[in-house]
Amino acid sequence: MVGLLLCRPFLEAKAPPLMEHKPEPRVTVDLTVRIWGMGADGRPFFQNGHAVDISSEGAKLSGIEHQLTPGDVIGVQFGDKKARFRVVWVIDAGLLQKIQAGVQMIEGQQCPWKQELAQPVQTPAQDTETASDPKNKRRFARHKILFPIELNDPRGIGARMQTNATDISGRGCYVETLMPLHKETMLDITFWMESEKVVTTGIVRACDGGVGMGIEFTGLDLEHQQRLQQFIEKLDAGFASSGEEQKGC
């Protein structure tokens, strides 16, 4: 569902090289930057844009008004610091965000937002659980297991998407996808707890371009959150036990 809801390239594109080697944790920000380079039309450009997702190795840039192609080299300036980056992936994010691009810093360049990365931040999974209620940061422990889940747009746009959450608790989950939905996007969510089918609602709380999205289960009351947490812990314990048995064989 999510892939069709966003755009067709989700079904066809391969994971960008930037994400294959698991870069350092990304920081969600909104930095005004200067971007320059050569557009796909062969003409030079120089414009303001935004770095909305940064790491020491790259960033997601938003608000680009010139078409780029993976492999292009562009310049990015934040404050008085400049660096050259290679374009890894490009998507049309619509009228407001225009063109978005994932970029990787070229070897030998100095990170222009090093100071911003030094600030303590939450991981995407932590952001999922604390966005609506910061007091409940550790109510439920997260478990890194593959958990089948179905996502659907409540507006009836696109088809359902059957996928796996890779990080889940009773309050929310993280779904890896090349083209995640924007923050605050509402979703209908379906999953199974043994023989019980659970249908609830959710909202995208964290968006990491080219990586995935954190989703909060907004339709689950505390009782159902606790039941889901117990079920996840049971699954995780089962996987761990199975792994130990295989090692002993």
Image: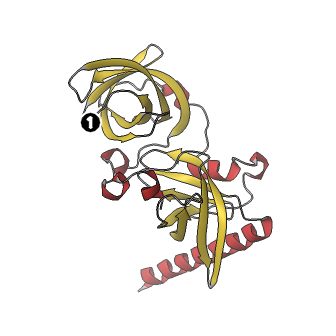
Check the picture and name the quadrant holding the C terminus: bottom left
Residue 189 visible from this viewpoint: yes
Lateral position of residue 154 relative to residue 181, left or right: right
Residue 233 visible from this viewpoint: no
Q: Splitting the image into 4 quarters, where does residue 110 fall?
A: top left
Q: State the residue at coordinates (29%, 22%).
A: 37
Which residue lies under the disc numbered 1?
69
Residue 139, given in percent of the width and then of the height, sits at 75, 58
Q: Residues within 10 Å of mark 1 (few under 14, many from 20)?
A: some
The residue nearer to you, when weighing 246 against 232, is 232
Residue 33 in the image: above or below residue 228: above
Lateral position of residue 201 relative to residue 81, left or right: right
The residue nearer to you, when weighing 228 against 157, is 157
Q: State the residue at coordinates (61%, 63%).
A: 188
Residue 116 in the image: above or below residue 121: above
Q: Splitting the image into 4 quarters, where does residue 29 fall?
A: top right
The residue nearer to you, when weighing 3 against 83, is 3
| Label 1 element class | loop
Kind of residue indicated by mark 1? Thr
Q: State the residue at coordinates (71%, 61%).
A: 140
Residue 128, given in percent of the width and then of the height, sits at 63, 51
Residue lying at the far left of the rendered structure: 42
Lateral position of residue 30 relative to residue 95, left or right: right
Residue 214, given in percent of the width and then of the height, sits at 57, 53
The residue nearer to you, when weighing 112 against 204, is 204
Residue 192 in the image: above or below residue 202: below
- Count every numbered label the image shows and give the total: 1
